[in-house]
Amino acid sequence: MIFPSSFMKKGTLRSFSLGSFVCGLTIGVVGTAVGATRMGSSVFPDVPAGSYYDEAIGEMYGLGVITGFQDGKFKPDDNLSRGQAAVMMKRLRDEIMGIEPTTSESDRSGSSSSRSSRSSSSQAASSSSSNSPPPVTVNEFGKLRFITNAYKQEEDDGSTNVTVIRTGGDKGMITVDYKIIAGTAKPDEDYEAQEGTLIFQDGETSKSFDVKILNDTDNEGDEEFTMEIDTPTGGAEIIDPKVATFTIEDDEGAGSSDATSSTNSPEEGTFRYSATEYAVSEVAGSITIRVERIGGAKGAVTVDYSMTDGTAKSGSDYTKTSGTLSFGDSETVKSFSVAVSDNAQIGGAKTVNLALGNPTGGSVLDTERKVSLLRIADDEVATFGSGSIRFTDNEYEVVESEGSVVILVTRQGGSKGVATVQYKTSNGTAHESTDYKEAEGVLRFEDGETTKSFTVEIIKDAASDVGETVNLNLSNVTGAGISSPSFATLWIY
C-alpha cells in the first residue's frame, strides 16, 4: 500500500517518512544513506529540539566540523568570529578532500565557537601565532576510500553498484585492488564471489564495481559480508573507510521482523547490544559493553563482536578488538571491554562503530540492535558526569498500519553510573485500547549506556483519522538529571 508523503496537522503541511528507515548525511559521489542523522539537540543542551538548525548542527558535529564550547554548550545565538569561521571551513575542506588533521592542528582549535569574547579570541590568536603551521598531509596522487562503510539490499533486488572515490589529488594513473570477504553470507550461495582491480586514469576520481546478490527461498534472516580495498599503486594511499559492510535483507520474512519481540525470537535467543549508543570519557581508560540474549536462552550459543573506526582512530583514540562471546544454557548477558586513550588535544567527541555477527546454535541477531555506536567524550571540551535524560525529539510519527513505533530516550552530558527513568503513555486525541496499547515501565541505563528505547503498539481501525496524538512522559529519574523534552507527542496517522 502507498501512503501519502505528507499529512495535515494544526493547519500546516507536515512531511512524513514512512517506515523506520531515515536517510542520513553522506558526503561523496553517490548518495548512499548509512544511518539516521544525529540531531544537535541530542549533543548540546542549548540547541532547541526541532529548530531549523537542529539537524545541521548534529551533522556537522558528527563530521568534526564543529565541537562546541568547553562547557558542553553550543551557544547558537552567539556571534561567529572570522577566526572561528576559518577553522570550520578548513575542517570541512579537510573532510571533503580526505586530509587528515595533525595533532598540533587539533590541539590549537577545538571548537567552531570556542571563543566568544574578544579577549579570549586574542589569546587564541596569540597562542596560534607562536606555533609553526602544521604540515598538510596532501597526496597529489590521491587517497582512496569507499564512499560509505555500509550497504544494504534485499536479496531479490539483483545487484548493487559499489563506489570507491579518490580524494585530495588526481595526478597520474593509479590502481587499487578490491575483494569480497565472506561473513554470515556465503560466496556463490548468497552473493557472487569476486575480486579485482580498479584503474583510475589521470584526473579520474571515482570508480565502481557491481555486487550481485543471489536470491534463495531459505528463511535465514539477514546476512552480511564485507568488502575491502588494498594494495594501492602509483603513489596513492588508502584511508578509512577501507572496509564496507554489506547487509543482505532476507525477503522470506525472518530478516524483516522485529527481533526485539520475544514472540519472534527462537528459543535459543536473539542477540543485541544493550543500548543503541554508549559513551565514555577519554580519561576513563575503558568502557564495558554489554550484549544481551533475549526472547530465549536455551542451549549453549556464541556470537562474535567487532568494531571499526568511526571518527575515532584505532591506536590513537581507542584499541580495536574483536572476539567471541560464549553463552551457556540460560545465560542472557555477556560483556567485553573497549580501551580508550586520553590525550591533551581539543578534538571533540569521537565515535567507534560496534557490530555483532555469526550467531550460532540456532540463535539470531536483532535486526535493529546488532550494531551500536560508542562515543568517546573529549574531557578538554566538556565535563562528563551522570548526565540528564530526555526524549530524543519533541514529536514522533507512525502510520497505524505499521503496528508499532520505537521511542528513543537518551542520556546526554555524561553516563557515569546506573540511572533509571519511568516512561508512560496517556491519551491525547487518541484513545488507549482503541488507537494504541498503553506503554508503561522503567528504562535502566547501565554505566556507559546513553540511548534506550521502548515500543508503543498501534491498533489499526477502519476510521479515517486525520492524525491522533498520544502523550509520552518521562518522570522519576534516579542516578541522573532530567532535561527537556521530558514530554513528547506521538502522532498516529
Image (cartoon, grey):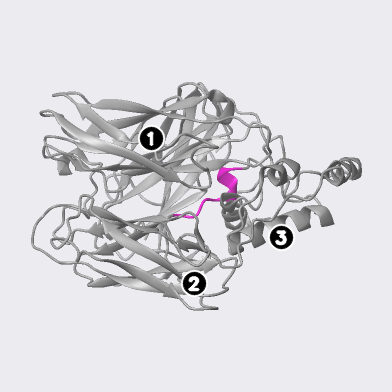
- The correct choice, above or below, for 320 with respect to 205 in the image is above
Q: Nearer the viewer, mark 2 or mark 1?
A: 1
Query: What residue lies at 51% left-to-right and 31% top-to-bottom?
Result: 340
Q: Mark on residue 321?
A: 1
Task: Point out the tag, 3 or 2, that comes first from the N-terminus.
Answer: 2
Question: Who's the residue at 79% across and 49% down the image?
Answer: 78
Give the residue type that dot 3 points to: Met
Q: Nearer the viewer, residue 124 or 395?
A: 124
| Residue that lies at the very extreme toward the front in this rendered image | 234
Residue at position x 55%, y 66% in the image: 142
Q: Residues within 10 Å of mark 3 (few under 14, many from 20)?
A: some
Q: Which residue is mark 3?
A: 89
Q: Residue at x 13, y 61 (%)?
A: 189
Residue 387 rendering spot, x and y as whole percentages: 56, 29
Magenta residues span 36-43
Of callouts 2 and 1, the N-terminal one: 2
Q: CA distance from mark 3 to mark 2?
A: 20 Å
201 part of magenta stretch: no
Under mark 2, the amino acid is Val
Give the residue furthest to the left.
Answer: 217
Q: Amino acid at mark 1?
A: Thr
Please state the horizontal and vertical placement of residue 323, each as a whole percent of the image. 30, 34
Q: Which residue is mark 2?
A: 29
Residue 394's place in the image compared with 298, above or below, is below
